[in-house]
Image (spheres, helix red, strand yellow):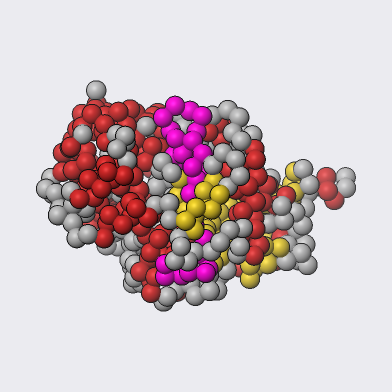
């Protein structure tokens, strides 16, 4: 048997691992970067894995973190494999040259899923395309839901974020042996993964571990502690236990996951509601990450690539028929969106004037997207001109009603449109030239910090990825975002509750 047939062997800080050669790429899957977070380690910060003797096989994806399945409405669009086992704090490496002299750029991928779902084993996140183009790709599993982001009086917060920091430290120590340059690491994530990227680059403990950052459809932010506490307390009430980590650790895991799914079923970016999130903890997250980055107190010299999809909200509203329902609600839905965004009546009036043919769902959805995503990205880019690049993904899915929805760009970023799971969001036959352009931009950014278009300045350049060659447009969202500068006249505080009650009735019938 030749060395290539046997598979590449690389020594990590905790022991040697044997990967596989796949189409000329060395692939290592399921490498532990921390000990299994179970037993006495449950709800605790990650600890190093136990070292091993000999060569550990790294041919298959490792266990995924405990998580509830997507609802039937969302599962038709999103894949989320489940791999059983306790050793879930693991990562994967795709490298074209597993030798210490290669010194290749590295991209570390943090998956999305509202901090409650997702994993590195989703087929769309195939890192071989980055390795094919000379960038080592590392994808990470981390704790989710109440296990990773519950807020308890007897356990440190942000366990899942601490897992991600442990993975970054592993990359810094180990990636040279896989052919990577530890001084040229790009941290990249989408949705909740992007929110995690923002928190990590702002974290004092992560300084020096990241050279560049990519935030796709998720801004740097810290959740309100009470919002996370309400999620935990509602779970505790249903389970009839105290809202402590010790009590939660004693509950059957499947029951815990079912309860988490039930309590969180009405939470969404549009509706708000209790949800898990990263919180200010005085330690890893000492202050609001967005403000720290804007003030220049964190991540000096880090290049930023940030962006959104044109119709983010459609993935939040199309499954289950909520898009049509919100349109029918009319003023109730708009009042809910205004309360959700702390906006007055002048904001939806302005959107109506700019988009006279838009329905209520589109107005409300774009308002929420601007409030939680585009405005923070604009503020951050304004504070860091010259080193920030912004984009908009505008190509519409071939599936009905989805448009250019949240997460649709992932198959293009990874150039993985040929895997069946990509078609669940994009439909059949997505344009290959668009994937070539978008993936190529990410590769260029990971190599040099320049994705191929003008960096942010006072003209507000935004790269728009759509059918045909991408174009740079100046200030495409400025008219809408200008509406938010007027002090709001707030709607009644019950508006969001009325909207949620209406949605609950719809889902139950």
Residue 448: give x, y in percent of width and height. 64, 65
Question: What residue is shown at x 48% (from left), y 49% (from top)?
Answer: 392
* Residue at image coords 61%, 29%: 429
Above-or-below relation of 75 to 202: above
Side of 462 relative to 433 (left or right): left
Residue 252 percent location from the top left of the image: 36, 42
Side (left or right) of 149 relative to 163: left
- Is the residue 502 above or below the residue 22 in the image? above
**Which residues are the magenta region?**
382-410
Q: Residue at the location (37% across, 31% down)?
A: 319
**Residue 15 magenta-highlighted:** no
Considering the image in quadrants, where does the C terminus appear? top left
Residue 120: x %, y % from top left: 55, 47
Residue 165 shows in the view: no
Q: Nearer the viewer, residue 61 or 198?
A: 198
Residue 244 x %, y %: 27, 56
Name the magenta segment's main secondary structure. Answer: loop
Which of the pair 327/428 is nearer the observer? 327
Q: Going by the image, does 271 lie left or right of 214? A: left
Which quadrant of the figure has residue 419? top right
């Amino acid at each position: 048997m030749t060395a290539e047939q046997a598979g590449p062997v690389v020594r990590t800080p905790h022991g040697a691992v044997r990967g596989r050669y796949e189409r000329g790429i060395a692939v290592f899957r399921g490498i532990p970067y921390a000990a299994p977070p179970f037993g006495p380690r449950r709800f605790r910060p990650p600890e190093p894995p136990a070292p091993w003797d000999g060569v550990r096989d790294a041919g298959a994806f490792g266990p995924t973190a405990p998580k509830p399945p997507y609802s039937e409405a969302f599962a038709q669009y999103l894949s989320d494999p489940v791999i059983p086992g306790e050793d879930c704090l693991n990562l994967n490496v795709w490298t074209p040259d597993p030798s210490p002299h290669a010194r290749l750029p590295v991209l570390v991928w943090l998956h999305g899923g509202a901090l409650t779902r997702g994993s590195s084993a989703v087929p769309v996140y195939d890192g071989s395309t980055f390795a094919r183009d000379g960038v080592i790709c590392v994808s990470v599993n981390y704790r989710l839901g109440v296990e990773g982001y519950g807020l308890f009086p007897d356990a440190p917060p942000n366990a899942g974020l601490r897992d991600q920091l442990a993975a970054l430290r592993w990359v810094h120590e180990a990636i040279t042996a896989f052919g990577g340059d530890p001084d040229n690491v790009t941290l990249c994530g989408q949705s909740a993964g992007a929110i995690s990227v923002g928190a990590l680059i702002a974290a004092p403990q992560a300084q020096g571990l990241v050279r560049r950052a990519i935030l796709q459809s998720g801004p740097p932010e810290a959740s309100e502690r009470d919002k996370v506490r309400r999620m935990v307390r509602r779970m505790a009430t249903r389970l009839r236990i105290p809202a402590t980590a010790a009590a939660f650790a004693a509950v059957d895991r499947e029951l815990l996951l079912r309860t988490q799914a039930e309590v969180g079923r009405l939470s969404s970016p549009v509706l708000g509601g209790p949800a898990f999130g990263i919180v200010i903890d005085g330690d890893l997250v000492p202050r609001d990450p967005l403000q720290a980055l804007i003030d220049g107190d964190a991540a000096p010299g880090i290049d930023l690539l940030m962006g959104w999809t044109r119709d983010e909200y459609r993935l939040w509203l199309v499954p289950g028929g909520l898009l049509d329902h919100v349109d029918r609600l009319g003023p109730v839905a708009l009042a809910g969106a205004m309360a959700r965004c702390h906006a007055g009546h002048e904001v939806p009036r302005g959107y109506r004037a700019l988009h006279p043919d838009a329905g209520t769902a589109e107005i409300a959805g774009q308002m929420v997207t601007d409030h939680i995503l585009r405005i923070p990205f604009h503020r951050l880019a304004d504070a860091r001109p010259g080193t920030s690049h912004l984009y908009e993904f505008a190509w519409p899915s071939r599936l009905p009603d989805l448009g250019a929805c949240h997460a649709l760009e992932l198959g293009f970023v990874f150039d993985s449109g040929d895997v069946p799971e990509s078609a669940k969001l994009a439909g059949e036959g997505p344009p290959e030239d668009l994937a070539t352009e978008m993936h190529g931009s990410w590769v260029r950014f990971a190599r040099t910090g320049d994705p191929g278009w003008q960096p942010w300045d006072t003209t507000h350049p935004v790269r728009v990825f759509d059918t045909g060659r991408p174009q740079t447009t100046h200030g495409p969202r400025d008219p809408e975002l200008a509406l938010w500068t007027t002090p709001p006249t707030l709607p009644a505080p019950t508006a969001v509750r009325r909207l949620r009650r209406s949605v609950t009735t719809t889902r139950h019938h």
